[in-house]
Amino acid sequence: MLRIAVPNKGSLSGPAAEMLHEAGYQQRRESKELRIVDPENDVEFFYLRPRDIAIYVSSGQLDIGITGRDLLIDSGADAEEILPLGFARSTFRYATKPGTANGVTDLNGMTVATSYEGIVAKHLADHGIDASVVHLDGAVETAIELGVAEVIADVVETGTSLRNAGLAVIGEPIMKSEAVVIRRTGTDGEEPKVQQFLRRLQGVLVARTYVMMDYDCRVEELEKAVALTPGLESPTVSPLHNEGWVAVRAMVPAKEAQRIMDDLYDIGARAILTTAIHACRL
């Protein structure tokens, strides 16, 4: 039975459970449940603190887990990313009062406050910077005002909290994070149950990214139409009852669907429609 760690709370929890449900896996009904078994898929799910998941997976007690890339790196655990999942995206950056520093090279001798000590210590070491790192569990924006540090390092989304605290981001991003699937470093990547799990999640990602597009066009405009909708391998083309017309079906990126429909209409395609993809295998 495949044993999988899933975030039990926070920004990772809801989207992870939704993706697993879309992939055909049973999920818990109550937030207090810490473990459920999905016998139809031969999977056992463990609901754990997102910060602890990399540790459990690296211990070998659990086969794989879903957590944040930032939490994986910060943990220092012997685990590795095997599939990015595209949700819970964030950017990790340094911030300080204007005029204090312009980038990581200016941080020598300074103190940096953060909730992600592992990430920051590694980033500073990679750049040859000798700075102190102070660990805080939250609200790091106040560290500078209270004299705990000259610089902070934290997740930045809109930057509103930083501006309200009189701070500004400096230098390049330390890292960009998102939800990822992880496994213990060095384990067999071809294990059938793991590969099936990954294929299901990849199918969800594709289904969310693409739509199916159908339309009719004249034969003489087919090459132009196919250039707009090449599909993954090739579109499906079928003759219509009316001579000189064909029906075309192809997967297209969802974010480009409206533009493609406009372009198809301009070359004479008609009866253009899109439908959602609920599941797929590539």
Image (cartoon, grey):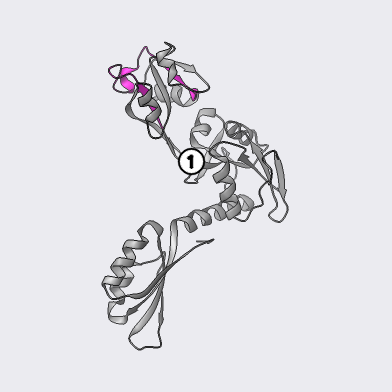
**What crowding class fits label 1: few (fewer than 14 Cα within 10 Å), some (14-19), or many (20 or more)?**
some
Which portion, as a residue range, is magenta? 92-117
Viewer-proximal residue among 217 and 191: 217
Please state which amino acid type lies under the numbered disc 1. Answer: Ala
Q: Quadrant of residue 255?
A: bottom left
Q: Is residue 111 magenta?
A: yes
Relative to 15, is 148 above or below?
above
Residue drawn at x 32%, y 86% is: 244
On screen, residue 116 above or below 14: above
From the top left corner, tell me how far across and down residue 116 is, in percent.
Answer: 49, 25
Q: Nearer the viewer, residue 95 or 118?
A: 95
Residue 176 horizontal/vertical position (percent): 41, 36
Q: Quadrant of residue 175?
A: top left
User: Where residue 179 appears, x then y in whole percent?
Assistant: 51, 41
Q: Quadrant of residue 142?
A: top left
Please tell me which residue is depicted at 57% across the width and 49% down the height of the picture: 18
Q: Does residue 236 appear to the left or right of 193 in the view shown?
A: left
Name the residue beneath numbered marker 1: 88
Judged from this view, the residue extending furthest toward the front is 164
| Residue that appears at 58% across and 52% down | 195
Can the viewer see residue 190 in this picture?
no
* Secondary structure type for disc 1: loop
The verdict on residue 25 being magenta is: no
Question: Please, is residue 168 above or below residue 148 in the view?
Answer: below
Q: How many marks?
A: 1
Q: Is residue 31 left or right of residue 140?
A: right
* Residue 112 placement (x, y as % from top left): 42, 17
